[in-house]
Image (spheres, coloured by chain):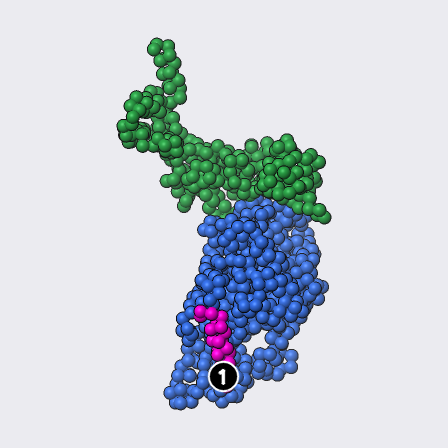
Chain colours: A blue, B green
Amino acid sequence: MIDAPARFASIADFEGFARSLRSQDRTGTRSVRLCMGTGCQAKGAARLYELFEEAIESASGRGRAGNIEVKPTGCHGLCQRSPIVVVEPAGIFYQQVEEPDVAEIFRETVLGGRAVPRLLYQDPESGRKLEAAEEIPFYKVQQRIVLSQNGRIDPTKITDYIAAGGYSALVKALTSMTPEEVIAEVEVAGLRGRGGGGFPTARKWRSCRSAAGGPKYVIGNGDEGDPGAYMDRSLMEGNPHSVIEGMLIGAYAIGSEKGYIYVRNEYPLAVKYLRTAISQAQEIGLLGENILGTSFSFDIQINRGGGAFVCGESTALMASLEGRPGEPRAKYVHTVESGLWGKPTNLNNVETWANIPHIINRGGKWFAGIGTEKSKGTKVFSLVGKIANSGLVEVPMGITLRRIIYEIGGGIRDGKKFKAVQTGGPSGGCIPAEHLDARVDYEELTNLGSMMGSGGLIVMDEDTCMVNIARYFTDFLLNESCGKCTPCREGLAQMRHILQGITKGDGQAGDVEKLQALAEILSGTALCALGATAANPVLSTIRYFRDEYDAHILDRRCPAKECRGLFIYQIDAEACKGCGICLKNCPVDAITGERKAPHVIDEQKCTRCGTCWEKCPFTAVLKV
Amino acid sequence: MPTVTIDGHSVEVERGATVLDAARYAGIWIPTLCYHPALSSEASCRLCMVELDRGDWRQLVTACNYPVRHDVIVYVMSERAQQARRGVMELLLARSPDSQELKELAERMGVKGTLWPKVTESQRNCILCGLCVRVCEQIIGKSAIGFAGRGADRTVAAPFRQPSEDCIGCGACAAVCPVGTIEVRVHKDECEVEISPFKSRVKLLVCKQCGAPILSTQVCEQALRNVGWATCLPMQACSQGNVGMGRKSAHATFWPELRKRLRLCPKCRRLQTAGRVASP
């Protein structure tokens, strides 16, 4: 529990407490920072935590423990190498730690101060073992602002956050800034919405502040639903107080007393940690009536989503918050004028909110110094797909896709060739190799037929069929379409029908033009952003990979050899050892051949099930 | 009052009126399906797309819910607006190819047919405009039906797709349906009215004289409740005797008379009145 007065009656009291936390003498304290993010937990981090606790207990029994603590933290980012353990004070970074390794780490590093080379990250190029996280290329290129405390603090302890400088931005805003000055600072920073829209945050706040009527509401949008994206989840799990502090400052600037955080129910850990964080903040008077003894009051309530992707759209989210079906409405009257329950409402993505304390603390000018002319600051991406280092990365705006994929991501997995990267979630576009030097900023990505989106980066290699990718995302969007408006419901169903035909080998000449016509209807007439951008995956793959569409339709051939039926299996006579495994496993007896002599697949009998390709121990079965 | 200029014709409308209001005022036709003046505008069918002049660019907006807050210039017959409306209509025709009403509207819009195949299931040509759902909620106050399912699986249904207990059998949903999906069916033998396809059934009030069905007992009850006469009324459901006896009021002669008259169908009532006039 919190070792603090029940409720701070004044700002001075709180500052005194914060000072005492921040100036605590930590020399001689050894700590084990253990990643307890969802990814690491899936790889057994919870058990590692128990083992470290046990080790500390038994060591203290023998009088050797001294000041040792094991700190469960949020996501460290390099999820590819989970579970991750960092031992302080030296900051030695261990990856892929397993249960038997705990005793060794404890004995050697925690007690002995020596590294265990076996568990260190090995640089794939130089082969050197790297001790500190900062040396690892994955971290070296990043610039962590929003994620700066992720992996450092225990998300369940408000004292950890305060000790790391937390809530000092709130104090600064409350003591030395008027609401107008707060908005002006955010304006100088040039912060734009991190949920994907990229709308200038300060302008939104100002409209909401000057909107007539009240009460006014602020909302944190944590309904992240893009396939493969987990930026918001890691932020809410790893540093929930930064979102709360951002919302507090925003509420002060806008003149709101009530906030909501809308989180996916599929993020149980985020819900749990946010709940804990809110109740801790309430307990010490950082949320509630008369915050820190001032006249400013604000409270936050958590709302769990019901699993609909479209509820990430602001008006659908608000409908869902009101208890109605999560369906969007027209935004001819903006939500800052008439949002939740018809009242002025300011909705921002949780990442946008988490940027606010940093802007207030370090100034808008500092923030505006990072990034490009129109896109300022950093952006968190989840780098997934056929990439060597999957993980959570935070990079300055304006960095090239190439640097993200090759320097941070370590290139394509298994030495394959890069084909495309999809940015912006299911409604984003696929960017091909020739545009890898494009800079990551809102305008440039839009010009390339994609978008910033909330920050998913899905990397595809040469084995990925782009037509199939377009079909997959169209399928996803059709399943997630609320079905309210005609173009989204009917248009996407038509698109899927055509794409399914093409990937099955039933494509017709003119299908591509039909897809383009449907895309035009969708983007012009759909009710919300989901429908209006739904054609992006199709349009961008047609734009950059038209040859693959043509190969499917005209030659009945899938160049990436992913669409079943659009390629055949053959046995490489030279590689085949005649072991007979394929022959035994073929369900339709399409393979013939004598033992120890090359086998042959009868094309007429073959159903292209791929069993022989999977079973062959000599990779002698080829897709052609 | 702001001025709306539609294809060169200018009209003045109240602030907050919609582009569709302005167009109707100016006598300019914009096709609609999910719009009804008595109900809120959801702009879900997207058939009323028009182009709005934004200065350096033009935006497609739905006329039925775009609020006029200052002077605006709108194009209804521009190529892009027409193409957008036609595109939506073609998608609707693909969904509900057998709807006569839809075909007629399409013809009026100059849409000859559709190049899209039928890929979504529609319940008796339902185009999911939602008028029935809104009228039941906003006018009748019952919310007996709503949307079920999501995306291409969306349908209009009573909760759990079971006959609704809240349905009063008024048939307002059938009345507003633009494509004739919803039907009011009278089952004479059971003395019940069914709202199809929702399978909701309500007892009918039948004529004392000739036995013809008059209207749903619950509609009658609700109507009388709305005018403040609820407690005064005995209802007679089909051959089940009196459902309730009203309190005796001061108007001792009025109530028995009203009671009697309510139990007659309009035809018998007319005959009775005519008979009384003939032989006083």
Q: Which residue is mark 1?
A: A26
Where does the image place residue A45, in percent across and percent down from the top left? 46, 74
Q: Residue at x 48, y 78 (%)?
A: A21
Residue B95 % position (x, y): 56, 41
- Residue A515 at x, y = what percent? 65, 49
For the question of whether residue A623 can be seen, the reply is: no
Q: Quadrant of residue B75?
A: top right
Chain label for disc 1: A
Residue at the top extreme, as displayed:
B279
SS label for mark 1: loop
Placement of B51 over or under A380, stated as above or below: above
Magenta-colored span: A8-27
Mark 1 neighbour class, 10 Å CA radius: few under 14, some 14 to 19, many 20 or more = few
Q: State whether residue B208 is above or below residue A311.
A: above
Image quadrant for the C terminus of chain A?
bottom right
Amino acid type indicated by mark 1: Arg
Q: Residue at x 64, y 74 (%)?
A: A141
